Image: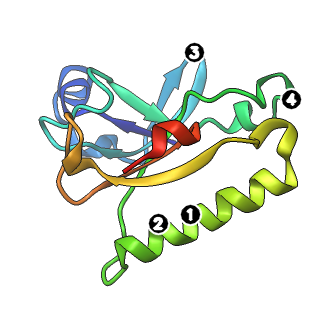
């Protein structure tokens, strides 16, 4: 799957709404377009396309890679403090199960509104060293 930036969508398909469900090639691999981000959305920086990282998770040579962030939206009625607690519990469990790759790492939930490239109403979930997680 792939999500396109507004600018990329407009420049490559003239803003055709029919692009949803259509394939785009990324390094020769077809990805189905599932959405277009709103005009002005910039995370992280000037990105044209977002896609899944399914192959990376299965590569044992990349198990120590710590360069990813995920963005999610809380479902209606979800509580930010409770979400933080749940994600911290998950990261602690993963640390106990796989200390060779996860010792000293945790996860945090930060509203993007507190970040320089903020989009209101979305959250950033990132894995970081404990010293980087102080609130």
Image point 28% across, 45% down: which residue? 18
> Closest to the observer: 10 or 110?
110
Q: CA distance from mark 2 to mark 3?
A: 36 Å
From the viewer's perspective, is 86 left or right of 47?
right
Q: Position of residue 29 (x, y in %)?
A: 61, 24
Residue that numbered label 2 is attached to = 84
Q: CA distance from mark 4 to mark 2?
A: 28 Å
The part of the image, by quadrant, that contains residue 121 is bottom left
Residue that numbered label 1 is attached to = 87
Image point 69% across, 41% down: which residue? 104
Q: CA distance from mark 1 to mark 4?
A: 24 Å
Task: Please say if the residues under marks 2 and 1 sit with CB atoms less than 8 Å apart.
Answer: yes
Callout 3: few (<14), some (14-19), or many (20+) C-alpha neighbours within 10 Å?
few
Q: Nearer the viewer, mark 2 or mark 3?
A: 2
Task: Please say if the residues under marks 4 and 2 sit with CB atoms less than 8 Å apart.
Answer: no
Image point 25% across, 42% down: which residue? 37
Callout 1: few (<14), some (14-19), or many (20+) C-alpha neighbours within 10 Å?
some
The reply to whether residue 32 is visible in this rendering is no
Residue that numbered label 3 is attached to = 27
Of the numbered discs 1 and 4, the one sitting upstream in the chain is 4
Residue that numbered label 4 is attached to = 60
From the viewer's perspective, is 18 left or right of 102?
left
Q: CA distance from mark 1 to mark 3?
A: 33 Å
Name the image colouring.
Answer: rainbow
> Closest to the observer: 84 or 132?
132
């Amino acid at each position: 799957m792939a999500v396109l930036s507004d600018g990329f969508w407009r420049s490559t398909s003239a803003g055709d709404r029919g692009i949803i469900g259509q394939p785009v090639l990324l390094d020769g691999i077809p990805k189905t377009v599932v959405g277009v981000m709103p005009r002005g959305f910039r995370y992280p920086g000037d990105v044209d396309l977002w896609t899944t990282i399914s192959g990376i998770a299965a590569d044992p040579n990349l198990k120590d890679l710590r360069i990813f962030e995920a963005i999610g939206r809380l479902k209606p009625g979800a509580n930010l403090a409770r979400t933080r607690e749940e994600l911290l519990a998950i990261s602690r469990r993963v640390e106990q199960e796989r200390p060779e790759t996860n010792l000293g790492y945790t996860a945090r939930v930060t509203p993007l509104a507190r970040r320089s490239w903020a989009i209101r109403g979305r959250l950033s979930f990132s894995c970081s060293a404990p010293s980087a997680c102080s609130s």
